[in-house]
Image: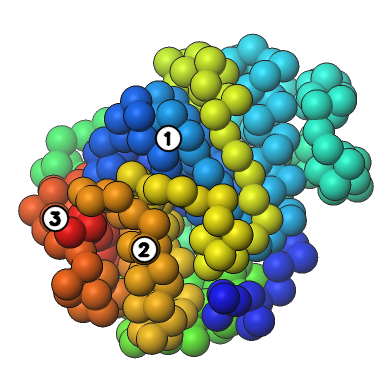
Amino acid sequence: MRSEAAGRTDWSILRYAQCWEDADVLLGALEPRADDNCLSIASAGDNTLSLLASGAKRVIAVDLNPAQLAAVRLRVAAYRELSHAELLELMGSRPSARRYRLYERCRPLLDRGAREFWDARRDAIEAGIGGAGKFERYFAIFREWVLPLVHGRGTVGALLEPRDRDGRERFFAERWNSHRWRLLFRVFFSETVLGRLGRDPSFFRYAEQSVADHLMGRVRHALVELEPWENPYLHWILRGTHGEALPHALRAASFEAVRANIDRLELHGVSIEELISSGDLDGVDRVNFSNIFEYMSSDAHRELLERVLDVARPGARMAYWNMIVPRRGSDVCPDGVRPLTDRARCLFARDKAFFYSAFHVDEAR
């Protein structure tokens, strides 16, 4: 069975050099156990590696894009070869003048495809591999060319200082949410610009609302309801590096756990449907769907979920995000899944990767 997205999207480029979903939310939803088989969309690898850090028995990562798998393979090599501090340098989370030398230490651990991919991108390595994707380059354009038209470095730095909620609301209203901010934001984060420079136009095929309107509301949530100074995703967008609060997979404790469990990871360059058809998936307990459902029609969503349920064990949990396309498993497979609505709502309220409109957790009946 062929994935619907496979025929409509260019899978030859690195779209994401980081995972832009909050692994703390994902782990709170799935709660992986020591004997679990986990299925995960690979993307750049961060959240898949966070599942490894949880101690799951087996983590199976899939992605149609060879470039995304090259990103994961370099991360795996870095966890094997580098120290935690060196990994943060290679990623771009911390300053470094030796990133290519760090890459050269990892290079012998890569397969031929990943070596060829990264050998051709020395500039991206030297800038930090966490900025090498199309989506991250889109944020770099925003950070370097658009944001300075609205706010200076002092205002950006002030935004990232600790405040209580009332202080954050006042700062947003009085210093950040200007007319120029709203105008340029709506232009730069429109479906047209985001589709051309950041994601892929096909990803908006089933959109049901304005991308810019949705994101404007979510940015306010991130700047007022959440604490900006402890949000690594916001730090990267505004400064091109992580702050002191790192994403889950890059924290020191996670680093040691990933390194200890790295041999439990399997990478497959196929769709979920093809993996199931191959017979290599003999029982699933936890699934990270990322946000793949909004790239497909409602019928394709139902067909994929039914296939996964065929190999899911009773009580298996599945987590996924929606941005601008509403997709819920309980809508298309009401007899197959039970939505864990309260858990999803509580986790979504503290989701630091603030782009999404909803987070869902389902349990196989």
Question: 238 and 199: which one is in front?
Answer: 199
Residue lying at 71% horizontally and 74% vertically, measured from the top left: 10
**Is residue 237 visible in the rendered structure shown here?**
no
**Is residue 104 visible in the rendered structure shown here?**
yes
Task: Identify whether 220 is placed above or below 93.
Answer: below
Q: Seen in the image, is 359 located left or right of residue 277?
A: left
Figure label count: 3
| Residue 203 location (% of width, % of height) | 52, 77
| Residue 198 location (% of width, % of height) | 60, 67
Residue lying at 57% horizontally and 34% vertically, measured from the top left: 265
Residue lying at 56% horizontally and 65% vertically, measured from the top left: 277
Where disc 3 sits, the SS reads loop
- Tag 3 residue: 340
Amino acid type of the residue tagged 3 in the rendering: Leu
Instruction: Tell me how the rendering is colored.
Output: rainbow
- Tag 1 residue: 51
> The C terminus appears in which quarter of the rendering?
bottom left
- Tag 2 residue: 310
The reply to whether the C-beta atoms of the residues labelled 1 and 2 are less than 8 Å apart is: no
Amino acid type of the residue tagged 1 in the rendering: Leu
Task: Identify whether 295 is placed above or below 131.
Answer: below
